[in-house]
Amino acid sequence: GDSVTQMEGPVTLSEEAFLTINCTYTATGYPSLFWYVQYPGEGLQLLLKATKADDKGSNKGFEATYRKETTSFHLEKGSVQVSDSAVYFCALLFYNQGGKLIFGQGTELSVKP
Amino acid sequence: DTGVSQDPRHKITKRGQNVTFRCDPISEHNRLYWYRQTLGQGPEFLTYFQNEAQLEKSRLLSDRFSAERPKGSFSTLEIQRTEQGDSAMYLCASSLGVTGETQYFGPGTRLLVL
């Protein structure tokens, strides 16, 4: 079945470091891809999305590019801040199959000052 | 637009009791989703509604679970005869149901079954 695999956490970085969180997926067809973020004590929020191959989603300095050839959607940020500390979830969705999201297990990011 | 709300935010119950959770979606969103999230894992899909019609149920949704959306607005998720394995965060999300539309999540209801 369709699935999403993320790199295991926790990931601990110093402020202003470069961030990469790996995400790969297995799916029959071409899903839309998402990154959601969950800050401590808050609900899931959409961070960015891409709906077709080679699309780049971006928001708040974060970027991810939909790579069909490697079935990947890695999340990157050039300079992280303490306020980026959260759990990040990669997810896929087929709109023609009811639109349910299939999530990875999440990657916890901790940024130290 | 006040976002998706869920009630209660926390629930502690004893094994064997029934519990009911409520979700109020963003107004005019015709799709409503329920997910379950256990500690250290990503959310897992349970079921979804298009207006008042329940269109899909996951195999995770045993016959002890029932969900309704009677007027196509708020939804309830009931768990009968709770078990310790039901302890989790129950998340609700809503969307317009249009291709490309984002799902917006509520804060969740954390259930602890003793």
Image: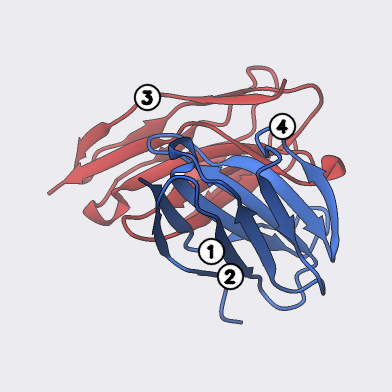
Chain colours: A red, B blue
The kind of secondary structure element at disc 3 is loop
Residue lying at 66% horizontally and 57% vertically, measured from the top left: B103
Image location (x, y in percent) of residue B34: 64, 52
Tag shown at residue A8:
3
Q: Are marks 2 and 1 on the same chain?
A: yes
- Label 1 near label 2: C-beta < 8 Å? yes
Which of marks 4 and 2 precedes in the sequence? 2
How many residues crowd around disc 2 within 10 Å: few (fewer than 14), some, or many (20 or more)?
Answer: many
Q: Residue B10's image quarter?
A: bottom left
Q: Is residue B52 depicted above or below A18 in this figure? A: below
Examine the rendering and report whether any part of residue A31 can be seen: yes
Q: Are marks 3 and 2 on the same chain?
A: no
Residue lying at 73% horizontally and 43% vertically, measured from the top left: A51
B20 and B33: which is toward the camera: B20
The kind of secondary structure element at disc 2 is loop
Separation of marks 3 and 2 at Cα, in angstroms:
30 Å
Which numbered mark, 4 or 1, is in the foreground of this view?
4
Q: Are marks 2 and 4 on the same chain?
A: yes
Residue at the disc numbered 1: B106
How many residues crowd around disc 3 within 10 Å: few (fewer than 14), some, or many (20 or more)?
Answer: few
